[in-house]
Image: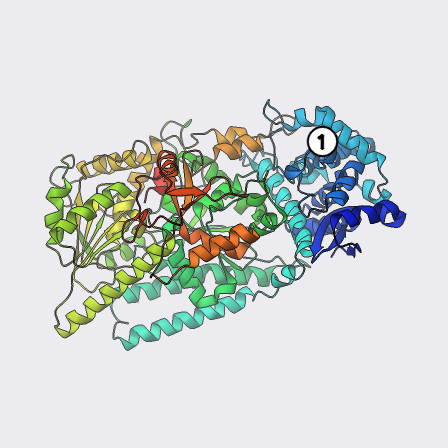
Amino acid sequence: MSTEKEVLSVDPAALTSRMNVDSDREEERVAHLRNDGGRLVCHDLDDHLAEVSRLAAMFAEAFGAAPWAALAGLWHDLGKFREGFQRYIRQCGDPDAHIEGRVAGADKTHSAAGALWAQRYLEEVDKRTGPVVARVLSYLIAGHHAGLSDWAGENKSLHNRFASEDAQRELATACAATIPEHLLKPAGSLPDMADLFRYRDDDKDDPIPGRFALWVRMLFSCVVDADFLDTEAFMSPGKSEVRQGFPGLDVLEQSLSERLARMARDVAARGEADSKVNRKRAEVLRVCIAKAELPPGVFSLTVPTGGGKTLSSLAFALRHAVLQEKNDQRTVKLKRRIIYAIPYTSIIEQTAGIFRGIFGDENVIEHHSNVEVDETRETARSRLACENWDAPLVVTTNVQLLESLFANRTSRCRKLHNLIGSVIVLDEAQLLPVAYLQPVVDVLRLLVKDYGVTLVLCTATQPTLESRTGFDQAKALRGFKAGEVREIVDDLPGLYADLERVRVHLPADLNATRTWDDLAPEIARHEAVLAIVGRRADARDLYRQLKTESSEGLWHLSGLMCAEHRSDTIQAIKAALAERRQALSTGEVTQPIRVVSTQLVEAGVDIDFPVVYRALAGLDSIAQAAGRCNREGRLERGEVYVFVPPQEPPPGLLRMAKQKTQHLWKALQAGSNPMGVERFGEYFSALYRDSSLDAKNIRDLLRSRGPEFQVMFRTAAERFRLIDEQDGATVFVRYRRDPEDDRIGMWLNTLKKNGPDRWLLRKLQRYGVTIYNNDLQRLLKQGDIEPLGGDFPGLYVQSADNDVLYDKVLGINVDGVPGDPGSLVQ
């Protein structure tokens, strides 16, 4: 732990005066300042560099790169020895003065000096290997505030930055300062070049573009997390202690075992233990626990919806991680985690809630926040508020996980080293983004190959992620090797046959559209029915049309509702369904339950209707919708009706998916099952064959070039956007569960007053709704919303005096959603 020294002053002016006359204190170099009730406390720079070096090396030891991280940590803040920086931080007394993006003037920057020193000094040490080692360290050191940069190019490249007069002056003035010899020229040999060549892209046995880039990003994660943690230990004493004390994964596994046993007893008490569905769920759970003893690698868990795959996959993950911990022969054992990734922000709260109910709030992180601070406007508090996944169980979104794996920003990259040795469960794996599928599969393969990750592809409609042959090889997916993905379930056809609980009714003409006016009376004839559409606007329009038939027992769900609102609505729907089942069992009169929803209910929402209507879409989406019908198998068969909606899906993936389903079904032989398990391989092969699997050329950008190992980190990160930030923005809405509920108002006031804390950002993320920019501009002009202000550009809040913007049923009164429609139209 690095040390701190109190400066006996009560204000910045007094601090400046004291230091100007106190020669002993003048020799002390300051890394950070903390204001303790009017007393400014200094964080010693020498100690900070030593501690960051130690922590970074400890993190990087997990993948054999400790010497690289140690050097980067030791030199990352060499520029702070500059007289200009020291004078600035002492005179202003601002706790944010150390944050490079917030300082004014080239004499106060500090992140280039250490990189340039590495280039100069390491070439002196070894003219052959020194420049190569320095290249790696330059990426890490120069990027520890602004993020990983492109090496070459016209836009903010490292090559141009290092050649600039400002950067050269930064190095010269840093070297002119009195820097201890043990920091400038540490004892020992250079990092082993074999480490670097082990991660080359052009490995002759299994070349995977981006391998070197991911290695650098992992090193970067180690350095920036070490920097954040040591800074936090100084800026927020006691906070680092809170990070300690998480229970071991074996304790969590025991908690899950106890919950599963209690659930089994409850099922037996209801007399339902011998139902076909519950027998199969128990079988899936048993086989998951048994297969967890297999060596690490890639697994698929293919289970029909309603087959209990959420808790079964978690049981697999915990058992597997516990066994790997026991088998870990390292002196310092790797801290393993479970990362549970879900496609939709709209349903992540349900899964996180289930896990918290089992393990406790303190042991589960739910991370899907759009609340990210602009790094050029960050503060000391906002830097410490970003997530590093410091818990044994993380529930996150595909967006958060995948964008982090291609990110260049410190706040996104910080968590990555904590993925090493983890078990990553990709729930609803069929929803991996098609336009980025090739680089996504590349990085998943690398996590397994180089970082000891076990990957579980969990879905009812398993995509085809093995390398494909037989068609245009230039467009073919270069995926997992044949046999590399191990299926956990032994008899897939038998499992699907046993869990077949619905009849699927196709329209006579797969091209004939139906209007809402025509469809609403038919839906309204059913007492309990779920209708799922593909667009938010469609959900609103169908809801309004059904309301003209009958408003009794009518519900709406879409992504225009914030997460808190959706959770409350889903719980109310579940309660109404339970009341209906109870009434039916006693012969009482039942109340109607009619729900109109977007596809957000198709993953992770365990509701059970006797009848489901689904707008024609991709085959996987229709299968997921069918999973909300007769889910518990209480009926001989549930009824699923597919209809052609009045409007086409938006151009792109959704429209293509719908067309592939139409083509597949038109070719069906009479009597064939349109939802047979064999259909899904055909569907995904056709979908991938006609899609660009690397639409933004990410693979090429991350390919290291030449002996200089040039990589385009920044450009790749800017292009890998599952949600296009330029097309949309987040609005915090003032949703209230009841008139007395003003939690959102209280939290927004706390944010504006005190700045961000992780607990606060986690609270606020449940009140965010993403809207298109054209809607945003209209609402701003009308005064319905206003910028959040401060350090949160791109974030907005519903005006305090506006009571009509957010509807208690339909959510925010705008249409549309930005982003990749394949994973985000809800």
Taking depth in this image into account, of 684 and 695 the one nearest to the observer is 695
Mark 1 sits on what residue? 106
Q: Is residue 129 something that shows in the picture? A: no
Helix, strand or loop under label 1 = helix
Residue in view at x 64 percent, y 45 percent? 224
Label 1: how many residues lie within 10 Å, few (<14), some (14-19) or many (20+)?
A: some
In the image, is residue 635 above or below residue 597? Answer: below
Residue in view at x 30 percent, y 55 percent? 305
Taking depth in this image into account, of 552 and 54 the one nearest to the observer is 552
Q: Which residue lies furthest to the right in this view?
A: 23
Q: How is the image coloured?
A: rainbow
Residue 531, image x, y percentages: 21, 50
**In this image, 659 relative to 424: left or right?**
left
Taking depth in this image into account, of 397 and 597 the one nearest to the observer is 597
Taking depth in this image into account, of 380 and 491 the one nearest to the observer is 380
Residue in view at x 21 percent, y 47 percent? 614
Q: In which quarter of the image is residue 75?
A: top right
Q: Residue furthest top?
A: 154
Residue 540, image x, y percentages: 24, 45
Residue 781, image x, y percentages: 38, 36
**In this image, 389 relative to 56: left or right?**
left
- Name the quarter where the C terminus is drawn: top left
Residue 792, image x, y percentages: 51, 43
| Image mark count | 1
In the image, is residue 782 above or below residue 756? Answer: above
- Amino acid of disc 1: Ala
**In this image, 304 relative to 84: left or right?**
left
In the image, is residue 794 above or below residue 277? Answer: above
